[in-house]
Image (tube, helix red, strand yellow):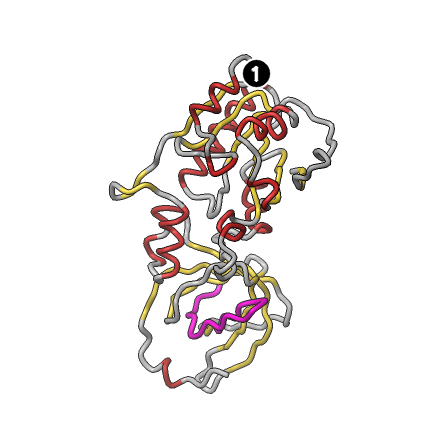
Amino acid sequence: METIYLEHSNTGLSFIESQPCVFALGFFDGVHFGHQRLIQTAKRISEEKGVPLAVMTFYPHPRQVFDKNNAPIKYLTPLHRKQEVLRNMGVDKLFIVKFDPNFAKLSPEDFVEQYLIYYGCIHVVAGYDYTYGYKGHGNIETLKKSGQGRFEVTVVNKISYNKEKIGSTQIRQLVSEGEMEIIPKHLGSYYKVNGYIARSHLLKNDMQELVIKIDADYLVPQEGHYQIQLNVHNILYHGTIQKISIRDNYTLLYAYIYEDFNLSIGSLVDVKWLKSIYVPGMENINVV
């Protein structure tokens, strides 16, 4: 997958040799069931047309730009994780547009001309509620009008669970509240973060303690005990999260592992959050 970073300026766009592409549009935080259907639809159309599939997304989240008083935005899929997921879904090109005040002022018409037409779009796939351009004035209907005679538009309808739309906002709320066992109904898999082992030692009760360092951009659940599964070098381990420590530039997860575990500091690890639990006796373990 080719990744192309774009930044809007008053001096013009980055020159990139364009080729006809099918474009999937969205922010895609979490890459949940709705996003998956959208990208799969775009992939099918790109294969039918014999052209590459391009995804155009944005970073950072618009809320980070518009509300300076907000704490830094936490993501279900920080940018590096999103790139990995999209690559595995068969995306050929990933356009990452820097969302800043200059880009936010762009009219819907200029967005179409300078970002879709300019970079070779022949077919757009977007969600039914997709908006774009200054203050979100552009929508699916304006996109269809702008595309007449130039590109086609396919709209992906809402996907629901328990009569509610599956969306990144709802999933972020579930993660924040520690409702980890419900998340597969929205994502298609358990919530995962990745990082590396920062510390490891044996406890008095023969359990192993790991301290896992993850990117500060990851959204993590509220304090509590969580059943987890770790993947280290494609070997699975089971245990619990006992403590979550959020710092300015990173987050530390204190995990207790039940199987024999002998891995070096710095080993990469995927953490799959299975469910929130109460573990009798764990409150007596001294975590430093």
At 39% from the left edge and 49% from the top edge, which residue is drawn? Answer: 169
Q: In which quarter of the image is the N terminus?
A: top right
Q: Nearer the viewer, residue 91 or 268?
A: 91
Q: Main secondary structure of the magenta part?
A: strand
Q: Can residue 71 be seen in this view?
A: yes
Residue 63 to residue 132: above or below: below
Q: Residue furthest top?
A: 149
What amino acid type should be assigned to the residue bearing mark 1?
Arg
**Residue 266, percent across and down?**
64, 68
Write down the residue under mark 1.
150
Horizontally, residue 113 falls left or right of residue 206, namely: right
**Residue 74, percent across and down?**
49, 57
Q: Nearer the viewer, residue 27 or 197?
A: 27
- Occupied quadrant, residue 56: top right
Asked if the stretch drawn in magenta spans residue 242, the answer is yes
For the magenta stretch, what is the residue range?
Answer: 236-254
At 56% from the left edge and 42% from the top edge, which residue is drawn? Answer: 58
**Residue 77, percent across and down?**
51, 51
